[in-house]
Every structure is written in C-alpha cells, then in structure tokens.
C-alpha cells in the first residue's frame, strides 16, 4: 500500500474510533456537521476531516490513547456504517472463519437480524431448540448470557449465541406486552420441516414452505403435483416465516408457476445487474390461479419468489411487507491478521431493485394485498419496547426465568392472511 493509502486508512480509523474509544467530542461533531454536505463521497475532503479528528485524539484526549485499540474500534465502526452484514473480524475470528470452525458451531434454530442495534429473532425454526424453549419470532434479544447485544455486530452477536452442542445459552428477551424475561436454550441442530400441503374450502390448495435451502423446490413440486391429482386448480404458496435459503432455489420454485421472463437478479456495485435468473418454460408445472403469502419474517430467497410473482403479474402477494434482506459477502484479509466481510452483491427483483433498502419504506417487497396479523411484532415497535424496559435494572445479569406453568388453552388466532388469499382465489 502507498504511503498516502496508509495515511488515509490510519486517519479514517482514528475518526471512527472516536465513538468507540472516547465517545463524542463536541468540537469534532460540530466540524463534521458543518461540512457534511460538501464532503460526502469526496475522499480528499473526508481525509482532511479525519486527519483533524486523529490530531485531536493524539493531542487533546485526556489519557494516552491506545492506538491499537483505536484502530480495532475504528475498523468495527467502519463496518457498522455500511450494513448489518458487513463485519470486521479480529485475527482470532479470521482464524476460525478460514478454518471453518465458526460455521461449525451449533446454533439454536433461529435466523437473526439486527434492529435498532439489537439482535432480533427474524424467524424461529419450528420444532428447533429455540422454539421448544419459548423464543418467538419478533423477540428482541437484549443480552446473550451477560453480554449486551446493543451495538455489537450481527456477526459477533450470532457467534455469542452459537457454541458447542448441548451447552446452554441464556437470552434476555424483550417482547411486546410482556415483562423482560430470560429464556435458556440448549444449543442443538434444527432442521426446518418439509413442505406441507392441504386443501382449503374444498377447492384451493395451500403449499406451506418452511425453508428454501437446497432441495426445497423439488419438495414444492411434489406437493403441487399431489394437489393437482386431487383436482386442485388454484394454489396459495405460503412463504411466511422463511428467512433462509438460496436465490437459485427460490428461482426454481418461482419457475414452477411462471413460464417465462426474468425471475430474479443479483446486483453488484452501483446496482448493476451481474446475474439474471430466467424462467425455463419446460419447468413450469402449474398454470392455475395462484397467490403468495408473506409476512415480516419473509426474507431473502422467499422475497425473490414474491417479487417474481409481482413482476410477472402471476398472482397476488397477500400479507405484510417482507423484511428486506439477501446479500452476498466476500472476505478481504488485512495486514495485521484481521479481515473484512464486505457485502459485494445484493439479491434483487427482476427489475434489479434490491430487497435490502435504507428503511422500512424501501425494504423488502410490498404485498399487492396488505393484510396484517394482530400478533405481528413489527421492527418499528422495537424502540417502544426499549423505552418500556425496566429503568431500575438497565444492565442485569440474566437470571433463569421460573419454570413455565401450563397455561389454559386459548382460541387460536384466526389466520386472516390465509383467509384473504383463499377468498381472492375462490372469487376469481
């Protein structure tokens, strides 16, 4: 690296580390605010500001700064300013990552996201360890054991949850309408159930999908063929709660319903389409009326199916706006043993619109027929949950919750989303 490049990295590291090491400095904040508009994406102007911040740290900070600590904090800060899926890895994490040990750790059967700086249970695998322990989709994880998840990277938080099979992890959970509680989960493998199907109103088939990992498309195909043998001519494809999977598997599922056109894309830098998934007419097996069900937990691969239905006008997407995810990272090693996982591509609709957006208005896929369930805990409610948290116990050491007592059975909440989708197909 050139001297100028090294200076730029050092200066930029120092700037971001202000927040990691010494908090906010008023004079630096004023400087950044005053010049923000004129320096956006101008490396030379940014470098001058960063150099000024670094100078203040070296000359004005009350103690002798540990510049190695500053550097690490800065590198983490740079990643956090990008997206939840880009991360700085320490040398120890790089060793684990490259050896495969990080991926080999056992989880609890949850797909996680990051909301308002906290770990968020985007989707809980049915029948998995977390599901059995009582964790729910939409739960905010405030602490993993005694470690706060606030403002640590999504990668780090997920590594805290994972560990050796059979060991226990304590999660302090914030949930709408309930007091904070600690849920203990025994780590173990979790496999999503296979595709299921049934018939509603005697004439509409429902295909419930739990995962879009490899092999799911063949399972969906088998269930469609089984429904067709029963004389079913209209199908609801239920993609609620799916937050895993592969985009090529999603395209194969969409292709079962869509004969031609683009099904999905992957976009790179400057939103340029770098890969396209096109329909193969020979693989389409169902041309009857069809609709897709989505909810907040529909994410990534499942969003690609919903986007294809909308783009190709194949049928309604009924339910809630999806979460907005689907990215690909590349690993870049650094000279001192650390490394970066940087997002280098995003999954996108046939038109090239990424599912990952800037806010809830641009994230995910908006349904053509919006139907919200009363029990959905939206990410917008997270800040409210945090405000309602016990102010007298802001940093508790998790204590196991009392053994759950059997609760009286209550009437099941009506599935208003499925009901609406069936009504629309029955009327068409």
Image (cartoon, helix red, strand yellow):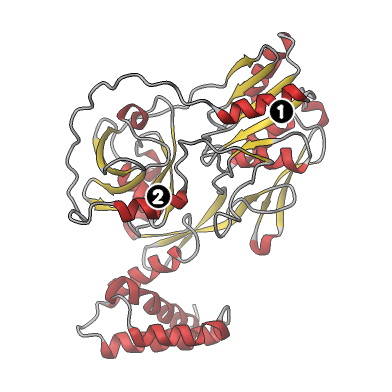
Disc 2 target residue: 97
Q: In the figure, 339 relative to 121: above or below?
A: below
Residue at left offset 30%, top offset 85% = 57
Q: Is residue 215 visible?
A: no
Q: Is residue 375 visible?
A: yes
Question: What is the number of callouts on the image?
Answer: 2
For residue 230, what is the image quadrant? top right
Taking depth in this image into account, of 72 and 82 the one nearest to the observer is 82
Expressed as whole percent of the image width and height from the top left, the position of residue 165 reads: 29, 32
Callout 2: helix, strand or loop? helix
Q: Residue farthest to the top? A: 230
**Residue found at x 28% / y 91%:** 59
Earlier sequence position, callout 1 versus callout 2: 2
Question: Observer-nearest residue: 321 or 114?
Answer: 321
Q: At 34% across and 29% down in the image, what residue appears?
A: 129
Where is residue 221? Give x, y as percent: 67, 21
> In the picture, residue 262 is in which quadrant?
top right
What is the secondary structure assignment of the residue under circle 1?
Answer: helix
Query: Residue 63, percent across and down?
Result: 19, 83
281 sits to left or right of 193: right
Q: CA distance from mark 1 to mark 2?
A: 48 Å
Q: Is residue 94 above or below residue 223?
A: below
- Image coords of residue 294 (percent x, y): 59, 36
Label 1 crowd (10 A; few <14 / some 14-19 / many >=20): some
Which residue carries the number 1 mark? 424
- Of 373 and 25, the residue lying toward us: 373
């Amino acid at each position: 690296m050139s001297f100028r490049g090294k200076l730029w990295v050092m200066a930029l590291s120092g700037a971001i580390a202000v927040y990691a090491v010494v908090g906010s400095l008023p004079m630096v904040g004023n400087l950044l605010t005053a010049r923000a508009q004129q320096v956006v994406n101008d490396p030379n102007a940014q470098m001058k500001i960063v150099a000024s911040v670094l100078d203040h740290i070296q000359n004005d900070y009350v103690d002798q700064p540990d510049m190695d600590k500053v550097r690490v904090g800065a590198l983490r800060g740079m990643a956090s300013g990008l997206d939840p899926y880009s991360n700085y890895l320490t040398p120890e994490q790089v060793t684990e990552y490259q050896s495969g040990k990080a991926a080999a750790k056992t989880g609890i059967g949850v797909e996680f996201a990051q909301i308002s700086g906290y770990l968020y249970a985007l989707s809980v695998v049915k029948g998995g360890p977390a599901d059995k322990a009582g964790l729910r989709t939409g739960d905010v994880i405030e602490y993993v054991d005694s470690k706060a998840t606030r403002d640590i990277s999504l990668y780090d938080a997920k590594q805290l949850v994972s560990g050796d099979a059979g060991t226990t992890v304590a999660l302090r959970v914030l949930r709408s309408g309930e007091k904070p509680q600690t849920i203990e989960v025994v780590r173990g493998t979790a496999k999503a159930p296979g595709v299921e199907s049934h018939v509603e109103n005697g004439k509409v088939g429902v295909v419930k999908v739990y995962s879009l990992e490899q092999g799911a498309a063949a399972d969906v195909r088998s269930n469609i063929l089984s429904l067709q043998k029963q004389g079913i001519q209209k199908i609801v494809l239920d993609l609620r709660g799916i937050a895993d999977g592969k985009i090529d598997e999603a395209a194969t599922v969409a292709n079962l319903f869509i004969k031609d056109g683009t099904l999905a894309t992957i976009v790179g830098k400057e939103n340029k389409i770098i890969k396209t998934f096109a329909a193969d007419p020979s693989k389409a097996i169902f041309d009857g009326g069809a609709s897709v069900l989505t909810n907040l937990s529909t994410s990534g691969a499942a969003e690609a199916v919903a986007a294809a239905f909308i783009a190709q006008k194949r049928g309604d997407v009924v339910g809630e706006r999806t979460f907005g995810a689907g990215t690909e990272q590349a690993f870049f090693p650094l000279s001192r043993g650390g490394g970066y996982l940087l997002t280098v591509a995003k999954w996108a609709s046939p038109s090239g619109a990424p599912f990952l957006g800037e806010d809830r208005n641009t994230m995910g896929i908006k349904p053509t027929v919006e139907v919200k369930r009363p029990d959905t805990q939206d990410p917008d409610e997270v800040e409210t949950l945090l405000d309602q948290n016990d102010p007298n116990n802001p940093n508790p050491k998790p204590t196991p919750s009392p053994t759950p007592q059997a609760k009286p059975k209550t009437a099941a909440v009506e599935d208003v989303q499925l009901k609406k989708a069936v009504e629309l197909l029955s009327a068409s």
